[in-house]
Amino acid sequence: MEFFMRHVTRYRIYPSQKVAGRLFNGFARCAFVRNWCLENKVYRDSCLPKLKEEHPELKEVHSKVLQNVVQQIVHNLIALRRLKAKGRKVGKLRKKWVHSMIYEQTGFKLTGNCLWLSKIGELRIELSRPVPGRIKQIVVKHTPAHRWFVAIISETPDTPEPTAGTRAVGIDLNLENFSTDTDGTVFPHPHNVQKAAKRLRRAQRRLSRAVDGSRNRRKQRVRIARIHEQVENRRNDFLHKWSRYYVDHYDYIALEHLNIKPMVESLESKIRGRSKSILDAAWYKARAFIQYKAANAGTYIHILDPAYTTQDCFLCGHREKKDLSQRTHACPVCGYTVPRDLNTAQNILKRASVGWGTPESTLAEIGAATPPIPAVQVPVGEARISRL
Ligand SMILES: [Zn+2]
């Protein structure tokens, strides 16, 4: 059996005004089909030929794109039903405006910096890196910041082999820095993200002062959408580099579940003006990125329960509550003294290691792989990777 690896790459596109008009027109037709299906409770694309006869303007859209609109509704309904089965409160699928179109298998052609879409025409694509493998799907998207993108979903026929290496690392995601690992590598919070976030807050204040329905307000909205995009892009860029670093350098990565991190920390983050929810979102994304990259590379990932990883002494296991202001772990029993986050990372790795591979080989492997315990304080305060 042949296996395929999926890739998603995103590129900026620059449609001319005429082509953009056709794209918007296509979005409107897709929205019409979506809303018609929801209204009439029809969830099969076999309704399309008849619908096209009644509304000939639908022929202005590539047929596979419209089929995909109907399939998308089915996917969404299944997802909703799953959530409902889990006891979550879910609403109904609402009628809405559409901002993207999906081309699947057919109706597109990519040559150099030119992308051709059926019924739309040619548009310039900024091919910042090559598309890996064979293209399966192209999603054309217009953002609230008035920018155009395509996401290209492609496949390569690889099967990742589980790694045989033994380089292991434990990573603590925390407030002080973005992350600290067992090798003493520290990633500070990305500065450019924080800067953009500050600009965003300022722009939002300006929006709240603008008069309702004014031209100024409309313009400010687009401006805010742009900054939002920038924050998102910068954060993703950082998280991609961060996860790439770990997947490239290690064969075994241990991380914590974050949803049950002590709430006290959220208090501290408020004091510092850094919102916990934003950090949470970044941490979730960080884990998602590292997981899919690891899956493609055959790297092991272990995500574990964070209980007591900050309180326990890595060396002797003595458990003692720590104040948040206490940045150093100094064990009163064995005297082990290291930065707080390093002790946490070491506990994460130690705890994760127990479940790795077969019981006999595990501990020996881990023993060989775990970095020696630093006797003196490692320079964790100093970022080893200042620029990625
Ligand atoms: Zn101790």
Image: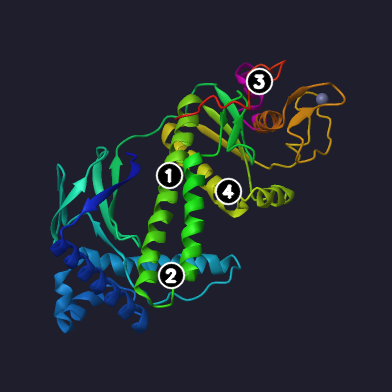
Work out how far the residue at label 4 is from the one at label 3, CA to CA, in angstroms.
26 Å
The N terminus, quarter of image: top left
Q: Which residue is mark 3?
A: 378
Picture coordinates of residue 211, whole percent (x, y): 44, 75
Residue 290 picture location, percent across and down: 49, 39
In this view, the mark in front (4 or 2): 4
From this viewpoint, is residue 203 visible? Answer: yes
Q: Earlier in the sequence, mark 1 or mark 3?
A: 1
Mark 1–mark 2 CB contact (< 8 Å): no
- Name the residue that disc number 2 marks: 77
- Relative vertical location of residue 42 with respect to residue 19 in this rendering, above or below: below
Mark 4 or mark 3: which comes first in sequence? 4
Q: Which residues are magenta?
A: 353-370
Q: Is residue 359 magenta?
A: yes
Give yes or no for contact between labels 4 and 1 (Cβ–Cβ under 8 Å). Answer: no
Marks 4/2 in contact by CB < 8 Å: the verdict is no
Q: Residue at x 69, y 17 (%)?
A: 374
**Amino acid tagged 2:** Leu
Q: Is residue 35 left or right of residue 236?
A: left
Of callouts 1 and 2, the N-terminal one: 2
- Residue 241 picture location, percent across and down: 44, 35
Between disc 4 and disc 2, whose residue precedes?
A: 2
Residue 75 picture quarter:
bottom left
Residue indicated by mark 1: 234
Q: Residue at x 34, y 43 (%)?
A: 7
Q: Quadrant of the C terminus?
A: top left
| Residue contact between numbered discs 3 and 2, judged by CB atoms under 8 Å | no
Q: CA distance from mark 3 to mark 2?
A: 52 Å
Tell me the residue that label 4 is attached to. Answer: 279
* N-terminal-most mark, 4 or 1: 1
Q: Amino acid at mark 4?
A: Leu
